[in-house]
Image: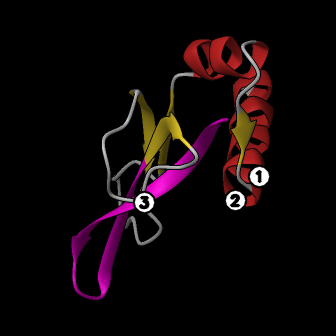
């Protein structure tokens, strides 16, 4: 099964996550099929907190990919933000 999930990058106590499409049987830091965005939970100032390619996310969701709980929440936030803009 294909999943859309977060993979942690960044330094100790400075998390940074890539949002990737991967096979659910692979380990978290393993090879991904595609990177569709990133999430920076400690963004400050003018730094971007969330960047997503919604077209690619929709493509993978149409193909049957299942988002993790946190990714589903981030996608819905991004959609609301896109509608408001």
Label whose residue precedes the other's in the sequence (2 or 3): 3
Magenta stretch: residue 8 in it?
A: yes
User: Residue 70 got which mark?
Assistant: 2
- Quote the CA–CA distance across marks 3 and 1: 19 Å
User: Which residue is labeled 1 in the image?
Assistant: 73
Specify whether 81 is left or right of 28: right
* Secondary structure of residue under mark 2: helix
Disc 2 and disc 1 in contact, CB within 8 angstroms? yes
The single residue placed furthest to the front in the displayed view is 25
From the viewer's side, name the closer residue of 45 and 77: 77
Q: Which residues are magenta?
A: 1-18
Magenta stretch: residue 11 in it?
A: yes
> Which of the 4 image quarters holds residue 27?
bottom left
Q: Quadrant of the N terminus?
A: top right
User: Which of label 3 and label 1 is nearer to you?
Assistant: 3
84 shown above or below 16: above
Label whose residue precedes the other's in the sequence (3 or 1): 3
User: Which residue is labeled 3 in the image?
Assistant: 28
Residue at 76 percent of width and 46 percent of height: 72
* Secondary structure of residue under mark 3: loop
Instruction: Specify few, some or many for label 3: CA neighbours under 10 Å numbering under 14, 14-19, or 20 or more.
Output: some
Residue at 30 percent of width and 41 percent of height: 31
- Quote the CA–CA distance across marks 2 and 3: 15 Å
Q: Please, what is the dominant secondary structure of the magenta stretch?
A: strand
């Amino acid at each position: 099964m294909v999943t859309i999930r977060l993979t942690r990058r960044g330094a100790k106590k400075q998390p940074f996550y890539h949002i990737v499409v991967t096979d659910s049987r692979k380990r978290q830091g393993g090879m991904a099929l595609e990177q569709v965005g990133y999430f920076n939970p400690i963004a400050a100032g003018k730094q971007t907190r969330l960047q997503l390619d919604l077209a690619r996310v929709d493509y993978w969701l149409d193909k049957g990919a299942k988002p993790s709980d946190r990714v589903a929440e981030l996608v819905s936030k991004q959609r609301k933000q896109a509608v408001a803009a």
